[in-house]
Amino acid sequence: MIFMDSRKPLYRHSLKEAVRHEEKDLWRESYKINCDCARAIERIIAENYDGKKLGPDLAEPIIQQYGFNRVNWVLANTVQQKKEDGRISPENRQWAETFPIPQEDHNWQFEVSSHPGLTDLFIGDVRKAWQALGLFTAAHCVENSQNQDYTGKLLVLNPHILGSAYQTPERQLFLAKDGWGCIPGAPRQTVFGRFLSEEKDQITFFNRSDFIGVLSAEYLPDWAKEKLAAMEVPETEETPSDGMTLQ
């Protein structure tokens, strides 16, 4: 399950997969918007470079128009296309490699063609804006918790599967209830549960692969503690390294 906002969703699969699943129209629409996003980045860089420095706060209007998911995707693709270009910083190159972008012959069409040094600066601004969201990461999860049984655990959703309007730390916390996906290595991957931030106990589901891991107890925010208390779900007395187990 992916929560969307008013923007068109990013299609992450290859054209070959899209054809196989009869989703070619979705692929084509997303591909065209990827190209539009790349051209918009090129324009804003060109319009705000005075020959010496790049203007401030350029990332925000692009993020507002296209959303973090697509902007990150287009920029990561750009870096992946510039494999041998030393003007891309090692940090941004490492970041770009975390995006599983299908390698296809037409990817160059949504590569940002601005000067690589200026593109690198723009990527840095986008990454700073992403970090400012204060999202949970693997560093906030129990080590190797991907191999745990998720039943009754407070899980952290990968923010990239959420629409931009929902990319908040509150929306990442998901209380797993049951489902085959709770069991590591199970043939089915569905995990049923609820968003901790929602008032109603509305059951929804995600795939096991949509989660980063189990939240470590030391990072449980105060609002979540209050919510759990209101739900009359007792906290365990486990150490922080054991994560949150909610029965």
Image (tube, rainbow, N blue to C red):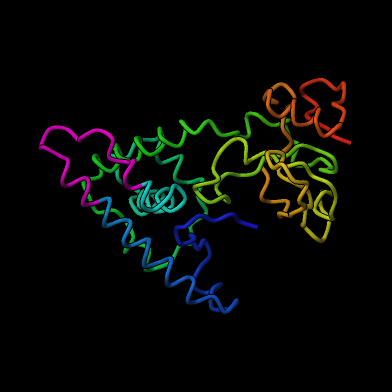
Image quadrant where one finds the C terminus: top right
Residue 149 position within the rendered picture, expressed as x and y whole percent measured from the top left: 84, 43
Image quadrant where one finds the N terminus: bottom right
Residue nearest the viewer, comparing 102 with 167: 167
**Whether residue 93 is situated above or below residue 100 in the rendered picture:** above
**Whether residue 116 is situated above or below residue 124 in the rendered picture:** below
The magenta region covers 42-62
In the image, taking residue 105 as reference, residue 57 lies left or right, namely left
Which residue corresponds to the image point at 66% horizontal and 50% vertical from the top-left? 210
In the image, taking residue 17 as reference, residue 96 lies left or right, namely left
Residue 140 position within the rendered picture, expressed as x and y whole percent measured from the top left: 65, 29
Which residue corresponds to the image point at 27% horizontal and 50% vertical from the top-left? 41
In the image, taking residue 49 as reference, residue 23 lies left or right, namely right
Count of number-bearing discs: 0
Which residue corresponds to the image point at 23% horizontal and 51% vertical from the top-left? 42
Residue 19 position within the rendered picture, expressed as x and y whole percent measured from the top left: 54, 78
Residue farthest along the left direction in this orientation: 51
Residue 108 position within the rendered picture, expressed as x and y whole percent measured from the top left: 33, 62
Which residue corresponds to the image point at 52% horizontal and 74% vertical from the top-left? 16
In the image, taking residue 90 as reference, residue 140 lies left or right, namely right
Is residue 213 highlighted in magenta? no
**Whether residue 4 is situated above or below residue 51 in the rendered picture:** below
Residue nearest the viewer, comparing 2 with 27: 2
Identify the image quadrant of residue 50: top left
